[in-house]
Image: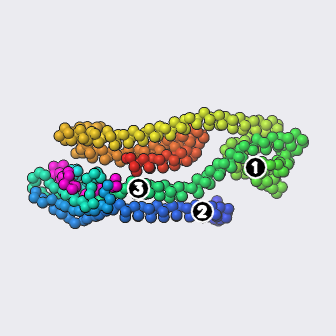
Amino acid sequence: MNMEDYKLKLQNFWRHNEKLIILIAGAFVLGVLIAGLNYWNHQNATNIMYTDETQVITNEDGAVFFFSIDEPQLAQNTEIDFVFENVDRDTALTIYINNERVDEANSNTESVTVDSEILEEENTVGVRRESIGFEDQALVSASVTSSTNFQQLIFVVTNLTAIILVAAPLMYVKYTQYVERKKIEQKFPEFLRDVVEGTRAGMSLPQAIKSTNEGSYGALDKHIEKMTAQLDWGIPFDQVLKTFGKETKSPLIKRSVDTIIQAYESGGNVQDVLESVGENIRSIKTLKQQRESQLYGEMITGYVVYFIFIGILIALNNFLLPNLAGAQEALGGSDMGVGGIGEGGEDLQDNINLYNTWFQRLVFIQGLFSGLIIGKLSEGELKAGLKHTAILFALGYLAVTFFL
């Protein structure tokens, strides 16, 4: 196929799908714009302060900066990110907020989550060196972010709305194609039955197909009309059937059409073949319905397992690991291990933060594969699981935002 053929094919595709393409492109641009504005607004709303004034930390002097929060009692997601110089485990620094010790910095970058109970409208952050040392450290920069649960909820809901807006046109197209394909498959056995009646009345197979043009087969009517027109134009019968099977986008009908073509070209008993094909389609449809009803429980089980998985991660992240950190502190900071914690210069709190990151990733990984598996089990197609994946992703996003 040369370049001219590609251009012609592209022009035909545009002509037949112009409105749909514009709708999809418009929804994509609008969704990305909403997500971008939402992120920009959220950043402006949550960034409380930022300082890049370097403060040297010596044996006598520490670093101090201040920040304000309008309603500290509502702040649920307050975090301070520090950047230091010359800090390691041997020269650890202690971080205080409103004269309360909250954490220890033993690397050049440190992130501290602040409990709302110690926050005030005007807050003082101090960084001091408790042990005597010969090399000075420095606070290079610090930033404070804080938000309420309501702000987080608005941020998440707006993001989900943007994602739905981007995906909605494509999902609608796929869904309408799926519904139309099911309707065509439902009417196809009835169409074959009428064709068989025509051949029994003495018509040839092409004549019998043309005679069904006056019937009512729902979504199949437009395809029958097109086949009739193609036969009137003198297009070869096998080519007409192949085009019909391809345009229905149904693997079941395409296989049936291939069988009919082979029987027609070999001179076999076409009536028996048509009856057999129609009966097989009805049997396959019945089996699919039985399988879907039997596997409905498996689909529910898939959702329940996903919720249990998220619940376990929340319990680990919010209860078990913090209690281990508290136990380590109660024992005087001895190296307690969870899968090698304490090795490689990382303490328990560093690993808790690492686990939290991986827990969040696992929620989305589990959502992706659980959705695909649910679709495969319930409808027999992996792509049918995309809608389940979208639902699980949305639920996982909410869980990650508010609980992990």
Instruction: Indicate whether 351 appears above or below 77.
Output: above
Q: Which label's residue is closer to the chain start, 2 or 3?
A: 2
Count the marks: how many?
Answer: 3
Mark 2: few, some, or many residues within 10 Å (few <14, many ≥20)?
Answer: some
For the residues labelled 2 and 1, the Cα–Cα distance comes to 27 Å
Q: Residue 210, can we see it?
A: no
x and y percent of residue 9 in the render? 65, 62
Label 1 secondary element: helix
Location of residue 342 in the rendering, given as x and y in whole percent from the top left corner: 23, 41
Find the magenta span and give its range.
74-101
Q: Is residue 103 visible?
A: yes
Can you identify the residue that label 2 sits on?
Answer: 23
- Residue drawn at (66%, 48%) of the image: 179
Q: Amino acid at mark 3?
A: Phe
Q: Amino acid at mark 1?
A: Gly
Quick check: is 27 in the magenta stretch? Answer: no
Question: Which image quarter is the N terminus in?
Answer: bottom right
Q: Residue at x 26, y 57 (%)?
A: 120
- Which residue in the protein does label 3 denote? 150
Q: What residue sits 50% from the left and 57% below the top?
A: 161
Q: State which quadrant residue 64 falls in.
A: bottom left
- Image marks 2 and 3: residues in contact by CB distance under 8 Å: no
Image coords of residue 57 (percent x, y):
15, 59
User: Residue 218 got which mark?
Assistant: 1
Task: Say the numbered circle drawn on residue 192.
Answer: none
